[in-house]
Amino acid sequence: MLIFRQLFDPQSSTFTYLLGAEASRDAVLIDPVFDQARRDAALLAELGLALRWTLETHIHADHVTAAWVLRERLGSRIGVGAASGAEGADLYLEEDAQIAFGTRFLRAMATPGHTNGCVTFVLDDATMAFTGDCLLVRGSGRTDFQGGSAAMLYRSVRERIFALPESCLLYPAHDYRGLTVTSVGEERRFNPRLGGEIAVGDFCGYMDNLRLAHPKQMDIAVPANQRCGRPAQETLRGDDPDWAPLTFSFAGIWEIAPQVLEEQTANVQVVDVREPTEFTGPLGHIRAAKLIPLGELQTRIAELGRDLPIVTVCRAGSRSAQAFNILRQAGFRHVANLAGGMLRWRAEGLPVDGGSS
């Protein structure tokens, strides 16, 4: 069975695609975004997947790839098109190259035109293809920089992508209107730029007169992506918490394990966001915890210091996750949620004040 997730970066309107093999737990990421590397690593961990490859459909001009940072952190390898001009990849993909993950594979198909190094990745059974910026949902990528060519893009779409089975689902690298997927059959019929009886001259004339502004991040993104996302000074972004060993969840929450918190209680502020009857109820509470019910947290934030990290606590971890977000939005940088809440704390036999035996 195929594991599939479509992920989105709202800043650059970029889709990242996760594909995994159920049996082997091997996975690939297509077009990962640097700013979402932590999110993607958390999802991989939660699904129990090992990242084997990151793949680039092209050298992006609107965001920096996470390929390098994921290789540093997870040991994955980087695959880019042979014509991309990128440095530092582990594999330069020639036509029909196969990238395996478990018993499944993606096939590289050259589709230049948006840039001269664009690649479309086709799943082994041709039920899915990942078109990058070559073909968008009811649109296409621009062709006015990085060796782009409208005539070349026309041929890539009409002769290559449209040659896939009609039912093949097409997933683009970007969308700006809330559209997530299309199919070969749909685009053949309904794409206003490239479908129907549109000739190459019609398409070239249209593209030559778009007069689009260059992407805002182009001067930063293109040089970085030509290095597969490696920072110029080769240092990882130093924004991971260093006050305790924490785990980042796919929900965007930093979590602390009960045993870790038990060792850190003298060095943190423990904020219990349950109701007073729960605080003194059967589960008891962590010693030195400060009771601020969730509904009162916004108005009582001034009671919390900014000199020590804060750990939020509730019964099972849900309300305290909301408290985590409230505190982060209020400017508290060092915050974590107690994973599993007081239920897990008690299950692990850790000390409490009050409560029943």
Image: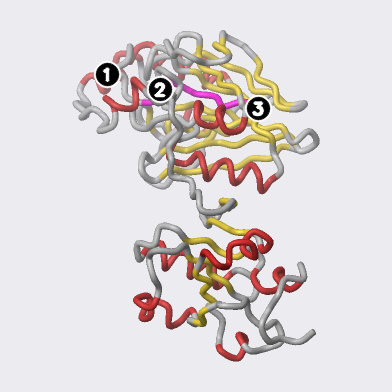
Task: Give the residue at mark 1.
Answer: 144
| Residue closest to the eye, 256 or 135 | 256
- Marks 1 and 2, the one that precedes in the sequence: 1
Front: mark 1 or 2: 2
- Marks 1 and 3, the one that precedes in the sequence: 3
Task: Give the residue at mark 3.
Answer: 52
Q: Amino acid at mark 3?
A: Arg
Q: Amino acid at mark 2?
A: Asn
Residue sitting at x 37%, y 23%:
232
Color encoding of the figure: secondary structure
104 versus 38 height, above or below: above
Q: Which residues are magenta?
A: 52-60
Residue sitting at x 50%, y 14%:
81
Q: Is residue 149 visible?
A: no
Residue sitting at x 55%, y 36%:
17
Q: Is residue 201 toward the left or the right of residue 211 in the image? A: right
Q: Residue furthest front?
A: 266
Which quadrant is the C terminus positioned in? bottom right
Q: Residue furthest bottom?
A: 277
Q: In the rendered structure, are the residues bearing label 3 and label 2 in contact, judged by CB atoms less than 8 Å apart?
A: no
- Marks 3 and 2, the one that precedes in the sequence: 3
Task: Give the residue at mark 2.
Answer: 225
Mark 1 burial class by Cα count in 10 Å: few <14, some 14-19, many 20+: some
